[in-house]
Protein backbone atom coordinates (compact mmCIF):
# COMPACT_ATOMS: atom_id res chain seq x y z
CA UNK A 1 0.00 0.00 0.00
CA UNK A 2 1.27 3.44 -0.90
CA UNK A 3 1.25 6.02 1.89
CA UNK A 4 -0.75 9.12 1.08
CA UNK A 5 0.68 12.45 2.19
CA UNK A 6 -1.76 14.44 4.31
CA UNK A 7 -3.54 17.15 2.32
CA UNK A 8 -2.99 20.78 3.26
CA UNK A 9 -5.94 22.35 5.12
CA UNK A 10 -6.69 24.66 2.17
CA UNK A 11 -6.63 21.77 -0.30
CA UNK A 12 -8.86 19.68 1.97
CA UNK A 13 -11.33 22.57 2.18
CA UNK A 14 -11.36 22.76 -1.62
CA UNK A 15 -12.02 19.04 -1.88
CA UNK A 16 -14.78 19.28 0.69
CA UNK A 17 -16.38 22.00 -1.41
CA UNK A 18 -16.30 20.17 -4.75
CA UNK A 19 -17.19 16.79 -3.22
CA UNK A 20 -20.06 18.08 -1.13
CA UNK A 21 -21.31 21.10 -3.06
CA UNK A 22 -21.41 19.48 -6.50
CA UNK A 23 -23.49 16.42 -7.50
CA UNK A 24 -21.06 13.49 -7.67
CA UNK A 25 -22.05 10.27 -9.45
CA UNK A 26 -19.83 8.06 -7.30
CA UNK A 27 -21.73 9.31 -4.26
CA UNK A 28 -25.33 9.86 -5.28
CA UNK A 29 -25.68 8.01 -8.58
CA UNK A 30 -27.88 9.11 -11.48
CA UNK A 31 -29.03 12.38 -9.95
CA UNK A 32 -25.49 13.72 -10.45
CA UNK A 33 -25.63 13.30 -14.22
CA UNK A 34 -26.37 16.43 -16.20
CA UNK A 35 -26.99 15.38 -19.79
CA UNK A 36 -25.80 17.55 -22.61
CA UNK A 37 -22.87 19.89 -23.06
CA UNK A 38 -24.30 23.26 -22.03
CA UNK A 39 -22.55 23.41 -18.67
CA UNK A 40 -19.14 22.20 -19.82
CA UNK A 41 -19.21 24.52 -22.84
CA UNK A 42 -20.11 27.48 -20.64
CA UNK A 43 -17.34 26.63 -18.17
CA UNK A 44 -14.82 26.29 -20.98
CA UNK A 45 -15.96 29.56 -22.54
CA UNK A 46 -15.25 31.31 -19.23
CA UNK A 47 -11.81 29.67 -19.18
CA UNK A 48 -10.92 30.73 -22.72
CA UNK A 49 -11.89 27.43 -24.40
CA UNK A 50 -8.88 25.44 -23.19
CA UNK A 51 -10.14 22.27 -24.89
CA UNK A 52 -9.29 23.87 -28.24
CA UNK A 53 -5.68 24.57 -27.27
CA UNK A 54 -4.12 21.09 -27.25
CA UNK A 55 -4.23 17.92 -29.31
CA UNK A 56 -5.95 14.89 -27.81
CA UNK A 57 -6.87 11.24 -28.16
CA UNK A 58 -10.35 10.33 -26.93
CA UNK A 59 -10.75 6.89 -25.32
CA UNK A 60 -14.14 5.35 -24.51
CA UNK A 61 -15.59 1.88 -24.03
CA UNK A 62 -17.07 -0.23 -21.26
CA UNK A 63 -13.87 -1.76 -19.89
CA UNK A 64 -10.20 -1.13 -20.55
CA UNK A 65 -10.38 2.56 -21.36
CA UNK A 66 -8.35 3.52 -18.30
CA UNK A 67 -5.59 1.01 -19.01
CA UNK A 68 -5.53 1.96 -22.70
CA UNK A 69 -5.29 5.65 -21.77
CA UNK A 70 -2.39 5.04 -19.39
CA UNK A 71 -0.47 2.85 -21.85
CA UNK A 72 -0.85 5.41 -24.64
CA UNK A 73 0.24 8.19 -22.29
CA UNK A 74 3.33 6.15 -21.41
CA UNK A 75 4.22 5.75 -25.11
CA UNK A 76 3.99 9.48 -25.81
CA UNK A 77 5.92 10.31 -22.65
CA UNK A 78 8.63 7.87 -23.69
CA UNK A 79 8.78 9.60 -27.06
CA UNK A 80 9.54 12.87 -25.30
CA UNK A 81 6.16 14.57 -25.53
CA UNK A 82 4.60 16.55 -22.70
CA UNK A 83 1.58 14.33 -22.21
CA UNK A 84 -1.65 15.05 -20.37
CA UNK A 85 -3.78 12.28 -18.93
CA UNK A 86 -7.37 12.70 -17.74
CA UNK A 87 -9.04 9.63 -16.21
CA UNK A 88 -11.73 8.82 -13.67
CA UNK A 89 -12.45 7.92 -10.97
CA UNK A 90 -9.48 8.42 -8.68
CA UNK A 91 -8.39 5.92 -6.05
CA UNK A 92 -6.39 7.73 -3.34
CA UNK A 93 -6.14 11.38 -4.35
CA UNK A 94 -8.51 13.48 -6.45
CA UNK A 95 -5.51 14.78 -8.41
CA UNK A 96 -4.91 11.32 -9.91
CA UNK A 97 -7.54 12.32 -12.45
CA UNK A 98 -5.36 15.06 -13.93
CA UNK A 99 -1.72 14.33 -14.70
CA UNK A 100 1.03 15.57 -16.98
CA UNK A 101 3.90 13.16 -17.58
CA UNK A 102 2.70 11.12 -14.63
CA UNK A 103 2.71 14.07 -12.21
CA UNK A 104 -0.55 15.08 -10.59
CA UNK A 105 -1.85 18.63 -10.88
CA UNK A 106 -0.50 20.63 -7.90
CA UNK A 107 -2.72 21.13 -4.87
CA UNK A 108 -2.19 24.88 -4.99
CA UNK A 109 -3.38 25.07 -8.58
CA UNK A 110 -6.56 23.11 -7.75
CA UNK A 111 -7.23 25.47 -4.83
CA UNK A 112 -6.77 28.59 -6.99
CA UNK A 113 -8.84 27.18 -9.85
CA UNK A 114 -11.85 26.41 -7.66
CA UNK A 115 -11.58 29.66 -5.70
CA UNK A 116 -11.52 31.79 -8.84
CA UNK A 117 -14.40 29.89 -10.41
CA UNK A 118 -16.64 29.66 -7.32
CA UNK A 119 -19.05 32.47 -8.34
CA UNK A 120 -19.57 30.80 -11.72
CA UNK A 121 -19.91 27.38 -10.10
CA UNK A 122 -22.68 28.74 -7.91
CA UNK A 123 -24.36 30.29 -10.95
CA UNK A 124 -24.01 27.42 -13.43
CA UNK A 125 -24.51 24.57 -10.91
CA UNK A 126 -22.33 22.07 -12.78
CA UNK A 127 -21.82 18.48 -11.72
CA UNK A 128 -18.64 17.30 -10.02
CA UNK A 129 -17.59 15.59 -13.26
CA UNK A 130 -18.13 18.73 -15.34
CA UNK A 131 -15.87 20.72 -13.03
CA UNK A 132 -13.14 18.07 -13.11
CA UNK A 133 -13.23 17.97 -16.92
CA UNK A 134 -13.00 21.77 -17.14
CA UNK A 135 -10.17 21.72 -14.62
CA UNK A 136 -8.22 19.14 -16.63
CA UNK A 137 -8.66 21.04 -19.87
CA UNK A 138 -7.55 24.30 -18.22
CA UNK A 139 -4.44 22.70 -16.69
CA UNK A 140 -3.43 21.02 -19.96
CA UNK A 141 -3.87 24.26 -21.90
CA UNK A 142 -1.97 26.32 -19.33
CA UNK A 143 0.92 23.86 -19.34
CA UNK A 144 0.88 23.67 -23.15
CA UNK A 145 0.84 19.89 -23.35
CA UNK A 146 1.75 18.40 -26.70
CA UNK A 147 -1.06 15.88 -26.48
CA UNK A 148 -3.55 14.60 -23.89
CA UNK A 149 -5.26 11.25 -23.41
CA UNK A 150 -8.87 11.98 -22.46
CA UNK A 151 -10.88 9.10 -20.98
CA UNK A 152 -14.65 9.21 -21.37
CA UNK A 153 -16.53 9.23 -18.08
CA UNK A 154 -19.71 7.41 -19.12
CA UNK A 155 -21.10 6.56 -22.53
CA UNK A 156 -19.70 9.03 -25.02
CA UNK A 157 -22.25 11.03 -26.98
CA UNK A 158 -23.38 13.18 -24.04
CA UNK A 159 -20.25 12.86 -21.92
CA UNK A 160 -18.65 16.11 -20.82
CA UNK A 161 -15.35 15.12 -22.43
CA UNK A 162 -17.04 14.94 -25.84
CA UNK A 163 -16.48 18.59 -26.67
CA UNK A 164 -12.89 17.94 -27.76
CA UNK A 165 -11.79 17.59 -31.38
CA UNK A 166 -9.35 14.67 -31.08
CA UNK A 167 -6.80 13.39 -33.57
CA UNK A 168 -7.98 9.83 -32.86
CA UNK A 169 -10.96 8.16 -31.17
CA UNK A 170 -10.72 4.73 -29.53
CA UNK A 171 -13.63 2.59 -28.31
CA UNK A 172 -12.17 -0.36 -26.41
CA UNK A 173 -15.20 -2.66 -26.20
CA UNK A 174 -18.92 -2.78 -25.49
CA UNK A 175 -20.62 -4.71 -22.70
CA UNK A 176 -23.40 -4.16 -20.18
CA UNK A 177 -22.80 -1.36 -17.68
CA UNK A 178 -24.73 1.77 -16.69
CA UNK A 179 -27.70 0.31 -18.57
CA UNK A 180 -30.11 2.65 -16.77
CA UNK A 181 -28.41 5.55 -18.57
CA UNK A 182 -27.02 4.07 -21.79
CA UNK A 183 -29.67 1.50 -22.73
CA UNK A 184 -30.35 -2.15 -22.01
CA UNK A 185 -29.04 -3.66 -25.25
CA UNK A 186 -25.52 -3.74 -26.63
CA UNK A 187 -26.75 -1.91 -29.73
CA UNK A 188 -28.11 0.99 -27.65
CA UNK A 189 -24.95 1.15 -25.57
CA UNK A 190 -22.83 1.10 -28.74
CA UNK A 191 -24.86 3.97 -30.16
CA UNK A 192 -23.93 6.10 -27.14
CA UNK A 193 -20.27 5.05 -27.22
CA UNK A 194 -20.09 5.75 -30.98
CA UNK A 195 -20.87 9.37 -30.20
CA UNK A 196 -17.16 10.07 -29.76
CA UNK A 197 -16.47 9.30 -33.42
CA UNK A 198 -15.82 12.67 -35.09
CA UNK A 199 -16.04 13.77 -38.73
CA UNK A 200 -12.89 12.83 -40.60
CA UNK A 201 -11.15 11.53 -37.47
CA UNK A 202 -9.92 7.94 -37.56
CA UNK A 203 -11.66 5.60 -35.12
CA UNK A 204 -10.29 2.42 -33.56
CA UNK A 205 -12.72 -0.20 -32.24
CA UNK A 206 -11.10 -2.72 -29.93
CA UNK A 207 -13.38 -5.71 -30.48
CA UNK A 208 -16.05 -6.66 -32.98
CA UNK A 209 -19.44 -8.00 -31.90
CA UNK A 210 -22.44 -9.03 -34.03
CA UNK A 211 -24.76 -6.67 -32.13
CA UNK A 212 -22.51 -3.61 -32.37
CA UNK A 213 -20.53 -3.91 -35.60
CA UNK A 214 -23.25 -2.38 -37.79
CA UNK A 215 -23.77 0.46 -35.28
CA UNK A 216 -20.12 1.45 -35.42
CA UNK A 217 -19.93 1.09 -39.20
CA UNK A 218 -22.96 3.31 -39.81
CA UNK A 219 -21.86 5.94 -37.28
CA UNK A 220 -18.36 6.04 -38.75
CA UNK A 221 -19.75 6.15 -42.30
CA UNK A 222 -21.81 9.24 -41.41
CA UNK A 223 -18.60 10.88 -40.20
CA UNK A 224 -16.67 9.97 -43.33
CA UNK A 225 -14.36 7.39 -41.75
CA UNK A 226 -13.98 3.62 -41.77
CA UNK A 227 -13.52 2.07 -38.31
CA UNK A 228 -10.39 0.00 -37.78
CA UNK A 229 -10.76 -3.08 -35.58
CA UNK A 230 -7.67 -3.53 -33.42
CA UNK A 231 -8.28 -7.26 -33.06
CA UNK A 232 -7.83 -7.58 -36.83
CA UNK A 233 -4.66 -5.50 -36.97
CA UNK A 234 -2.72 -7.28 -34.22
CA UNK A 235 -2.48 -10.84 -32.96
CA UNK A 236 -1.25 -10.96 -29.36
CA UNK A 237 -0.10 -14.09 -27.53
CA UNK A 238 1.13 -14.46 -23.96
CA UNK A 239 4.38 -16.48 -23.86
CA UNK A 240 5.17 -16.38 -20.13
CA UNK A 241 4.72 -14.20 -17.07
CA UNK A 242 5.77 -13.57 -13.49
CA UNK A 243 3.85 -11.77 -10.74
CA UNK A 244 4.95 -8.35 -11.99
CA UNK A 245 5.36 -8.62 -15.78
CA UNK A 246 3.94 -10.53 -18.70
CA UNK A 247 5.80 -11.26 -21.92
CA UNK A 248 4.03 -11.17 -25.26
CA UNK A 249 4.60 -12.03 -28.87
CA UNK A 250 2.66 -9.74 -31.20
CA UNK A 251 2.13 -9.97 -34.94
CA UNK A 252 1.49 -6.87 -37.02
CA UNK A 253 -0.97 -8.17 -39.62
CA UNK A 254 -0.40 -5.14 -41.87
CA UNK A 255 3.10 -6.34 -42.74
CA UNK A 256 3.25 -9.80 -41.09
CA UNK A 257 6.08 -8.93 -38.70
CA UNK A 258 6.63 -10.54 -35.30
CA UNK A 259 7.68 -8.54 -32.24
CA UNK A 260 8.19 -9.19 -28.53
CA UNK A 261 6.83 -7.03 -25.74
CA UNK A 262 7.18 -6.90 -21.98
CA UNK A 263 4.24 -5.39 -20.09
CA UNK A 264 4.16 -4.39 -16.41
CA UNK A 265 0.34 -4.66 -16.31
CA UNK A 266 -0.24 -8.33 -15.54
CA UNK A 267 -3.98 -8.78 -16.08
CA UNK A 268 -4.82 -11.21 -18.86
CA UNK A 269 -7.33 -8.68 -20.19
CA UNK A 270 -4.43 -6.32 -20.97
CA UNK A 271 -3.72 -8.39 -24.07
CA UNK A 272 -6.90 -6.88 -25.54
CA UNK A 273 -6.02 -3.37 -24.41
CA UNK A 274 -2.50 -3.53 -25.80
CA UNK A 275 -3.94 -4.13 -29.28
CA UNK A 276 -5.65 -0.74 -29.07
CA UNK A 277 -2.34 0.90 -28.16
CA UNK A 278 -0.40 -0.85 -30.92
CA UNK A 279 -3.04 0.07 -33.51
CA UNK A 280 -2.89 3.70 -32.41
CA UNK A 281 0.90 3.53 -32.74
CA UNK A 282 0.60 2.37 -36.36
CA UNK A 283 -1.80 5.19 -37.21
CA UNK A 284 0.21 7.95 -35.53
CA UNK A 285 3.86 6.86 -35.77
CA UNK A 286 4.74 8.79 -38.91
CA UNK A 287 3.05 12.06 -37.97
CA UNK A 288 4.35 11.99 -34.40
CA UNK A 289 7.75 10.39 -34.99
CA UNK A 290 6.98 7.41 -32.78
CA UNK A 291 9.41 4.50 -32.94
CA UNK A 292 8.95 0.88 -31.88
CA UNK A 293 11.46 1.33 -29.04
CA UNK A 294 9.18 4.04 -27.60
CA UNK A 295 6.46 1.39 -27.38
CA UNK A 296 8.64 -1.36 -25.93
CA UNK A 297 10.28 0.90 -23.35
CA UNK A 298 6.95 2.47 -22.33
CA UNK A 299 5.03 -0.76 -21.88
CA UNK A 300 7.68 -2.12 -19.51
CA UNK A 301 7.12 0.84 -17.20
CA UNK A 302 3.49 1.97 -17.50
CA UNK A 303 2.97 2.06 -13.72
CA UNK A 304 6.15 4.05 -13.13
CA UNK A 305 5.49 6.48 -15.97
CA UNK A 306 1.81 7.11 -15.28
CA UNK A 307 1.05 5.92 -11.74
CA UNK A 308 -1.62 3.42 -12.81
CA UNK A 309 -3.04 1.31 -9.97
CA UNK A 310 -5.77 -1.25 -9.40
CA UNK A 311 -5.57 -3.35 -12.58
CA UNK A 312 -4.65 -6.86 -11.38
CA UNK A 313 -2.34 -5.00 -9.04
CA UNK A 314 -0.12 -7.43 -7.08
CA UNK A 315 0.60 -6.07 -3.61
CA UNK A 316 2.52 -9.07 -2.30
CA UNK A 317 3.19 -12.73 -3.09
CA UNK A 318 2.71 -14.62 0.21
CA UNK A 319 -0.20 -14.68 0.40
CA UNK A 320 -0.71 -13.52 -3.18
CA UNK A 321 -2.66 -10.28 -2.72
CA UNK A 322 -4.27 -8.68 -5.77
CA UNK A 323 -6.43 -5.60 -6.29
CA UNK A 324 -8.65 -5.23 -9.33
CA UNK A 325 -11.21 -2.52 -10.04
CA UNK A 326 -13.45 -4.94 -12.01
CA UNK A 327 -17.05 -4.07 -11.16
CA UNK A 328 -19.32 -5.13 -14.02
CA UNK A 329 -20.14 -8.46 -15.66
CA UNK A 330 -17.51 -8.21 -18.40
CA UNK A 331 -14.81 -7.03 -15.99
CA UNK A 332 -15.53 -9.79 -13.47
CA UNK A 333 -15.48 -12.38 -16.27
CA UNK A 334 -11.97 -11.27 -17.21
CA UNK A 335 -10.87 -11.52 -13.58
CA UNK A 336 -12.31 -15.05 -13.38
CA UNK A 337 -10.34 -16.03 -16.47
CA UNK A 338 -7.21 -14.71 -14.79
CA UNK A 339 -7.97 -16.72 -11.64
CA UNK A 340 -8.04 -19.93 -13.69
CA UNK A 341 -4.40 -19.32 -14.59
CA UNK A 342 -3.31 -18.34 -11.07
CA UNK A 343 -1.88 -20.84 -8.58
CA UNK A 344 -3.10 -20.74 -4.98
CA UNK A 345 -4.39 -23.08 -2.26
CA UNK A 346 -7.49 -21.20 -1.15
CA UNK A 347 -9.13 -18.01 -2.40
CA UNK A 348 -10.24 -15.18 -0.11
CA UNK A 349 -12.34 -12.46 -1.79
CA UNK A 350 -12.91 -9.03 -0.26
CA UNK A 351 -16.05 -7.92 -2.08
CA UNK A 352 -18.05 -4.71 -2.11
CA UNK A 353 -20.40 -3.36 -4.76
CA UNK A 354 -22.52 -0.31 -5.47
CA UNK A 355 -26.30 -0.43 -5.63
CA UNK A 356 -26.77 0.37 -9.31
CA UNK A 357 -24.72 -2.53 -10.73
CA UNK A 358 -26.04 -5.89 -11.95
CA UNK A 359 -25.26 -7.40 -8.57
CA UNK A 360 -27.05 -10.74 -8.85
CA UNK A 361 -25.50 -11.55 -12.22
CA UNK A 362 -22.03 -10.82 -10.84
CA UNK A 363 -22.65 -12.86 -7.69
CA UNK A 364 -23.83 -15.82 -9.77
CA UNK A 365 -20.49 -15.77 -11.60
CA UNK A 366 -18.22 -15.80 -8.56
CA UNK A 367 -16.52 -19.00 -7.30
CA UNK A 368 -18.50 -20.79 -4.59
CA UNK A 369 -15.43 -22.39 -3.04
CA UNK A 370 -13.90 -19.04 -2.00
CA UNK A 371 -14.24 -17.44 1.42
CA UNK A 372 -15.89 -14.02 1.22
CA UNK A 373 -15.42 -10.86 3.24
CA UNK A 374 -18.44 -8.72 2.34
CA UNK A 375 -17.97 -5.02 2.88
CA UNK A 376 -18.84 -1.57 1.59
CA UNK A 377 -16.92 1.50 0.53
CA UNK A 378 -17.61 4.70 2.45
CA UNK A 379 -19.86 6.27 -0.18
CA UNK A 380 -23.68 6.60 -0.21
CA UNK A 381 -24.01 4.45 -3.37
CA UNK A 382 -22.41 1.45 -1.67
CA UNK A 383 -24.62 -1.57 -1.05
CA UNK A 384 -24.64 -2.26 2.71
CA UNK A 385 -22.46 -5.23 3.54
CA UNK A 386 -25.26 -7.16 5.27
CA UNK A 387 -27.49 -6.86 2.19
CA UNK A 388 -24.63 -7.98 -0.03
CA UNK A 389 -24.07 -11.00 2.19
CA UNK A 390 -27.76 -11.94 2.05
CA UNK A 391 -27.84 -11.67 -1.75
CA UNK A 392 -24.59 -13.63 -1.99
CA UNK A 393 -25.98 -16.45 0.16
CA UNK A 394 -28.68 -17.08 -2.46
CA UNK A 395 -25.79 -17.89 -4.81
CA UNK A 396 -24.11 -20.16 -2.22
CA UNK A 397 -21.31 -17.68 -1.50
CA UNK A 398 -20.25 -17.96 2.13
CA UNK A 399 -18.39 -15.60 4.42
CA UNK A 400 -18.79 -12.75 6.89
CA UNK A 401 -19.64 -9.07 6.58
CA UNK A 402 -17.55 -6.14 7.75
CA UNK A 403 -18.63 -2.48 8.01
CA UNK A 404 -15.40 -1.13 6.52
CA UNK A 405 -13.05 -2.22 3.77
CA UNK A 406 -10.11 -1.92 6.14
CA UNK A 407 -11.66 -4.46 8.54
CA UNK A 408 -12.57 -6.84 5.72
CA UNK A 409 -9.11 -6.65 4.19
CA UNK A 410 -7.37 -7.09 7.54
CA UNK A 411 -9.47 -10.17 8.33
CA UNK A 412 -8.78 -11.69 4.92
CA UNK A 413 -5.05 -11.19 5.31
CA UNK A 414 -5.14 -12.68 8.82
CA UNK A 415 -7.05 -15.78 7.71
CA UNK A 416 -5.05 -16.35 4.51
CA UNK A 417 -2.19 -18.85 4.64
CA UNK A 418 1.08 -18.11 2.79
CA UNK A 419 0.02 -20.16 -0.26
CA UNK A 420 -3.49 -18.69 -0.39
CA UNK A 421 -4.72 -15.73 -2.44
CA UNK A 422 -6.52 -12.55 -1.36
CA UNK A 423 -8.47 -10.75 -4.11
CA UNK A 424 -10.08 -7.34 -3.59
CA UNK A 425 -12.68 -6.49 -6.25
CA UNK A 426 -16.28 -5.50 -7.03
CA UNK A 427 -15.87 -1.73 -6.99
CA UNK A 428 -13.14 0.79 -7.68
CA UNK A 429 -14.24 2.49 -4.46
CA UNK A 430 -13.44 -0.66 -2.46
CA UNK A 431 -10.01 -0.89 -4.10
CA UNK A 432 -9.47 2.80 -3.35
CA UNK A 433 -9.70 2.12 0.37
CA UNK A 434 -6.90 -0.46 0.16
CA UNK A 435 -4.30 1.23 -2.06
Image: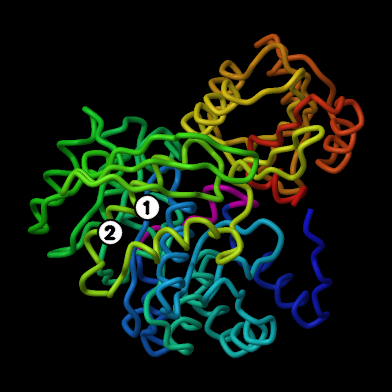
Per the image, label 1 sits on a secondary structure element best described as strand
Q: Answer with the quarter of the image where residue 295 lies.
A: bottom left
- Residue at the spot 56% in from the left edge and 24% down from the top edge: 336
Which of disc 2 and disc 1 is earlier in sequence?
1
Left or right placement of residue 200 versus residue 153 in this view? left
Q: Position of residue 116 (x, y in %)?
A: 59, 90
Q: Position of residue 70 (x, y in %)?
A: 48, 59
- Mark 2 element type: strand
Spatial distance from mark 1 to mark 2, Cα to Cα?
8 Å
Decide: is 419 above or below 378.
above
How packed mark 2 is, by other alpha carbons closer than 10 Å (few <14, some 14-19, many 20 or more), is many
Judging depth in this view, the residue of 110 and 56 nearest the camera is 56
Q: Camera-side residue: 52 or 24?
A: 52
Tell me the crowding category of disc 1: few under 14, some 14 to 19, or many 20 or more residues within 10 angstroms, Cα based: many
Residue 315 vertical position relative to residue 339 in the rendered view, above or below: below
Q: Indicate which disc residue 169 carries.
A: 2
- Residue 312 place in picture, x, y as percent: 61, 41
Q: Which residues are magenta?
A: 26-36
Residue named by callout 1: 60
Amino acid sequence: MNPVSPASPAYQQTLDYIFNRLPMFSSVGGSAIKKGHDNILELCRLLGNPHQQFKSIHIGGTNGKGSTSHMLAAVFQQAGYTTGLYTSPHLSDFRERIKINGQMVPETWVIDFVEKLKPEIERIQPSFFEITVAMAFAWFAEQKVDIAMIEVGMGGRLDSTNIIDPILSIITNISYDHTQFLGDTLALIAEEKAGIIKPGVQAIIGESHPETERIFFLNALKKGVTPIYAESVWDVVLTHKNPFHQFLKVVDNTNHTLHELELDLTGKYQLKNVRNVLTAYLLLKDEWGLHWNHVTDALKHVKKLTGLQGRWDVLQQHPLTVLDVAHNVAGIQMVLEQLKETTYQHLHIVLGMVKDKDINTVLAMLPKEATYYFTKAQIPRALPEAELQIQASTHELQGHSFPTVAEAFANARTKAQPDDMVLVCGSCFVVAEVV
